[in-house]
Amino acid sequence: MARAEYEYENQEELKYIWYLQISGRGDEYAPVRRIICKGCERVYFTQVHCVKFCYECRFDNIGIKHVRRKNRLAKRENTVCKSCGNTFTPQRVGAVYCSNACRQKAYRERVTDSVSR
Ligand SMILES: [Zn+2]
Ligand SMILES: [Zn+2]
């Protein structure tokens, strides 16, 4: 835990050590790996071996959630907006409008309907 926190706060330093190592001058340091986080796809530098997620993604298993969310989003692609008829990828489960504008438009129409009735 302390190690991960240290790395998170010292990314610049790790990046520097990594840079020294790839240019063959980092002998006195523990090996630094440059990874692409499997959760958020950001570059992350770490000396902990077998780490696949950046600090933020590793805690609370956010990384896993990111991956799952991506899979879910892929499944939900091509939902048709109930207001304008465009296809879109919903950002949350059960979304039926492509944008706030469409949602508000639909809401206003509903309100006007019930008033005129
Ligand atoms: Zn991440
Ligand atoms: Zn729409």
Image (cartoon, rainbow, N blue to C red):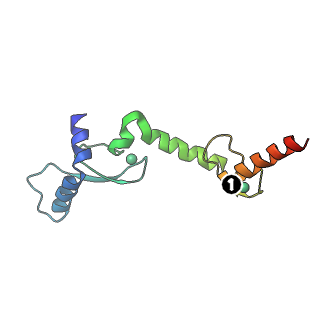
Residue closest to the eye, 88 or 38 = 88
Assess disc 1: are there few (<14), some (14-19) or many (≥20) residues with their C-alpha within 10 Å of its C-alpha: few
- Badge 1 element: helix
- Residue picked out by circle 1: 101
Query: How many marks are shown on the rendered structure?
Result: 1
| Residue 95 quadrant | top right
Residue drawn at point x = 34 percent, y = 46 percent: 54
**Quadrant of the image containing the N terminus:** top left
* Residue 107 picture location, percent across and down: 75, 46
Q: In the figure, 28 relative to 65: above or below?
A: below
Q: In the figure, 16 relative to 4: above or below?
A: below
Residue drawn at point x = 17 percent, y = 59 percent: 21
Answer whether residue 96 is visible to the viewer in this image. Answer: yes
Answer whether residue 99 is visible to the viewer in this image. Answer: no
Instruction: State left or right for residue 52 relative to residue 2.
Output: right
Residue drawn at point x = 25 percent, y = 40 percent: 5
Instruction: State left or right for residue 64 relative to residue 90.
Output: left
The residue at the far front in this view is: 115
* Residue 89 picture location, percent across and down: 64, 52
Mark 1 Cβ and ligand 2 under 8 Å apart: yes
Instruction: State left or right for residue 82 relative to residue 62.
Output: right
Q: Amino acid at mark 1?
A: Ala
Instruction: State left or right for residue 83 relative to residue 70.
Output: right
* Residue 78 picture location, percent across and down: 70, 53
The residue at the far left in this view is: 28
**Quadrant of the image containing the C terminus:** top right
The residue at the far right in this view is: 117
